[in-house]
Amino acid sequence: MGIKLVIVESPAKARKIGGFLGDDYVVEASVGHIRDLPQRAADIPKEYKKIAWAKEGVNIEEGFEPLYVINPDKKAKVSELKALMKDADELILATDEDREGEAIAWHLIEVLRPKIPIRRMVFHEITKEAIKKAAEETRDLDYRLVDAQETRRVLDRLYGYRLSPVLWKKVMPRISAGRVQSVATRLIVERERERMAFISSKWWDLTAQCEAGFNARLLSLDGKRVAATNDFDANGGLKEKSAANILLLDKAGANELVQSLSGKALTVKSTEESPRTERPKAPFTTSTMQQDAGSRLGWGAQLTMRVAQRLYENGYITYMRTDSVTLSQSAIESARNSAKSLYGAEYIPATPRVYEGKSKNAQEAHEAIRPAGETFRTPGELAPELSRDEFSLYDLIWKRTIASQMSDAKKMQMRVDFDVETKTGG
């Protein structure tokens, strides 16, 4: 009886998964894509050298058919995989369950040409339970994802090869134009033009530092409301309908008021309490994780994804490229149980929270990014196993996941209006 050959993308992932499967399995890494569109003229096959479209790698005259070639640095890997397949009675493709992963699996089939049964194995976390279950519940290749990735790759190539030379001539050498960044640059330029055309306004307001430990802002003086941001139009002037009732303070007027009001006693005119509730945020998607890591840790997107990749491949979090905010039923229960154990039953709602994503194109097969496993280990429990960066990101993910299943925060906001006597009467 032969072996079952399992192919994943990365060596780290292969080592982790190999430890969960039995001796009947051999787990090997493709180390990313094994073939792509030609990157240089030397990569173009001999029979295509004289064909005009081969340089771009896309035949735009015949349905945008791509020309794929095995990457020069992957030829040895392809030979290694073919040799392993000779002793296998089954090929299991366990690349990531997204467009890129599905495309890698398809390219492996196209290049290896296996004559043995092929299965597609997918999972969202690298734990023993998840891998065992995935090995038992395989599926066929999803050609819709393959087509989607191929479309993106073709568009990337056409944008880059046709627009980049224009930038070299008009802007500077060796810069590139991409399918996404070109559009994003246009939006940034349009926004910058709006900013440059904006006519700014200058006005002053006053804030009193009270001995009781809070600040009070001057809202009105002698029956006129002190100007605020929303009172100005796009041309930098006060909106006509409210100009007569607005007090526009300049620096001299503001300083005069400071001298007049300093040390004066404030008299409470009225108080108003407003109860507020704040719902917890949804679990992390890729973009919200990057935003939170940027604001809280000061990280860029590349560092965030690099650390998340390590956490995923070593079995600490679920797959980190996802648009989904949903959690599996077992993950919801784990989050609720963790919150109950740590903070008490009064801090979890009677029914689980269910989140819905805003993106119509979300790859909903994935869950949101969360701690891996049936029971979420706390950051403190994992601290000895993680690097400083890994701990910091895991801590963010763990807290966001647990909080997503907790009760609303309850707050009380109080507004206090004061009167103060001025030289003009109040």
Image (cartoon, grey):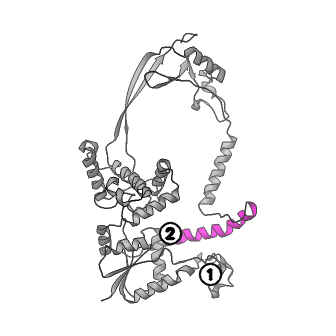
Residue 410 painted magenta: no
Residue at horizontal 34 percent and vertical 41 percent from the top: 408
Image side of residue 340 versus residue 102, left or right: left
Dot 1 lies on which element? Answer: helix
Q: Quadrant of residue 153 in the image?
A: bottom right
Which range of residues does the magenta coloring cover? 147-175
Image location of residue 140, percent across then percent down? 38, 76
**How many numbered marks, from 0 up?**
2
Task: Name above or below for residue 49 compared with residue 321.
Answer: below
Q: Quadrant of residue 407 in the image?
A: top left
Whether residue 361 is visible here, answered yes or no, is: no
Q: Which residue is mark 1?
A: 43
Q: Which residue is mark 2?
A: 148
Q: Earlier in the sequence, mark 2 or mark 1?
A: 1
Residue at horizontal 46 percent and vertical 18 percent from the top: 418
Task: Name above or below for residue 50 compared with residue 420.
Answer: below
Residue at horizontal 47 percent and vertical 48 percent from the top: 296
Dot 2 lies on which element? Answer: helix
Q: What's the residue type where badge 2 is placed?
A: Ala
Instruction: Give the mark toward the camera: 2 or 1.
Output: 1
Q: Which mark is residue 354?
A: none
- Main SS of the magenta part reads helix
